[in-house]
Structures are given as structure tokens and as C-alpha cells.
Image: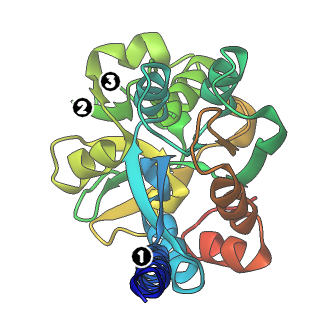
Amino acid sequence: MKKFAIFILLVASLLLAGCNSKETTTNVDKETEGKKIPLTVSAAVSLTEALEEIKELYEKDHTVDITLQLGGSGTLARQIQQGAPVDIFLSANQEWMDTLEKEDLINRSTRANITGNKMVMITSADSDIQYTSAAQISAKDVEQIAIGNPKSVPAGKYTEEALHHLNKWNELKDQLVLAKDVRQVLTYVETGNADIGFVYESDAVNSDKIKMLATVDDSLHGPIVYPGAVIANTKHEKEAEDFLTFLQTEEAQNIMKKYGFKK
């Protein structure tokens, strides 16, 4: 009888342990179920409005939580070189993406051209400046010209190329105010701290505080292309690739077009 009682206690213990194990597994499943995968996207600041809308749309149907890190492409690329935890890089030119590719910091197979842009010359909305071409700029007419720093900002590099082609760089170099990114250029012109500036068309169309004086001819600078790629050491490769693929869909491209981008 005593042995039978011990047997019953052992069976009961095993059953209880099984229930507890099942309950623990269920609790773990509930904790992970519905959890969003964090994705960090380092992107050229000119993409701000377009990416914010795309992010909101994408997160509705995907279990990801996207964080946008926006800035000059060169600054962002250097952060990636220094080990910043990033999943996707969207550059405003090929050069910075090439740099990361040479250092094996991106997954080459995921690299794709996402969109494109144009350079425009702008002035504040209440300015009297009447230039219709960058070739007309004279150091006698303007005190300050805002451009992105060519060493780290692709828009600044494109502007430098254009001014060199027009034989204007040396004449105007003392008037140049170098900004950390294209959005700072926009702010300088909006506030009247610079007489004119050079930004992407996508930046200009979204501001009612400036007016576009002219579009810079594409032949004066290299092609403005925005490449994207998944970072090599991402912990969320599939989710990163899926988002990068989505950026190339018609749905995402239509949002890009709305903000002045052209593939």
C-alpha cells in the first residue's frame, strides 16, 4: 500500500511538471508573439518625408519597427564604418555606397538603385534675385551661397562639379557657406542667411519659404542616383531585404514621385 502511494505521488509530480512546462512554453510564445523586429535605416536626409510616409505604410502590414537615421550620406557612411548598428543604408550618391562595398560592409547582392533626383538653385520666397541659370551668378550680386559640404554631402559634390563646369567655382568660393547636409542649406536660404542655395528638387518642392530659380543641367554633374543596400552584419537580414525590395515597388515609387524624386 505504501509503495502504491509513492507511485501515485510520482505520477502526480510528473503530470504537474508537464503542465508547468507547457504553461512556461505558452508564456514564452505569448511574449514573442507579435513582437516587432527593429530595423535601423540610415538614409540621406533628402529622403526624409518620402521615407516617413513609406515607413508608416510598411509598418501597418509588417512586424517591423523602423527607425530612420537621417543625415549627410558621408556622415552616415562613416558611422557604418565605425560599427554603428545599422540594417540598411540609402545613399544620395554611388560614391559612398562604393566605399562601403569595397570594405565589405554591405551585402553586394542586395545593392540596388532606389530613386534619383535633380539639383536646383533656390532663393528665399521674398528675394528679388532673378537668376534663371547658375551661369548668371556673380560675386558682385550675392554675399552668401549655401551648398552642402562637398566632402561629405553628395548635393554639395554635385554643386561643386556644376560650378567647376561653368567656370564659377573660383569666382564664388569666398561666398560659399558649407552646410552639414542639404536640409541645412534649405534652412539657410529659407531664413535669408544665404542669398541663394543649391538643393535637390525634392527638397525645394516641399518648402513654401523658397522659390526655385533654375534647374541645374544634368550634364554639369554626375548622375544623381540613390543606391540602397543591406548592411553586411545586420542581425535581421530577411526583414532588411524585404524592406529594401518594397522600396522598389510601384507603391513605394509613387510615394517617392510625390515628393519630387525620379528614378
Is residue 113 rendered to the left or right of residue 71? right
Amino acid type at circle 2 is: Gln
Q: Which picture quadrant has residue 220? A: top right
Compared to residue 40, the image places residue 260 above or below, namely below
Q: Which picture quadrant has residue 125? A: bottom left
Q: How far across and down, in percent of the image, does residue 246 sit?
A: 71, 68
Residue placed under numbered mark 3 in the picture? 139
State the residue at coordinates (75%, 62%): 245
Q: Nearer the viewer, residue 226 or 160?
A: 226
**Element under disc 3:** loop
Q: CA distance from mark 1 to mark 2?
A: 67 Å
Between marks 1 and 2 in the image, the one whose residue lies nearer the viewer = 1
Q: Nearer the viewer, residue 206 or 249?
A: 249
Q: How far across and down, in percent of the image, does residue 234 sit?
A: 58, 41
Quadrant of the image containing the N terminus: bottom left
Residue placed under numbered mark 2 in the picture? 144
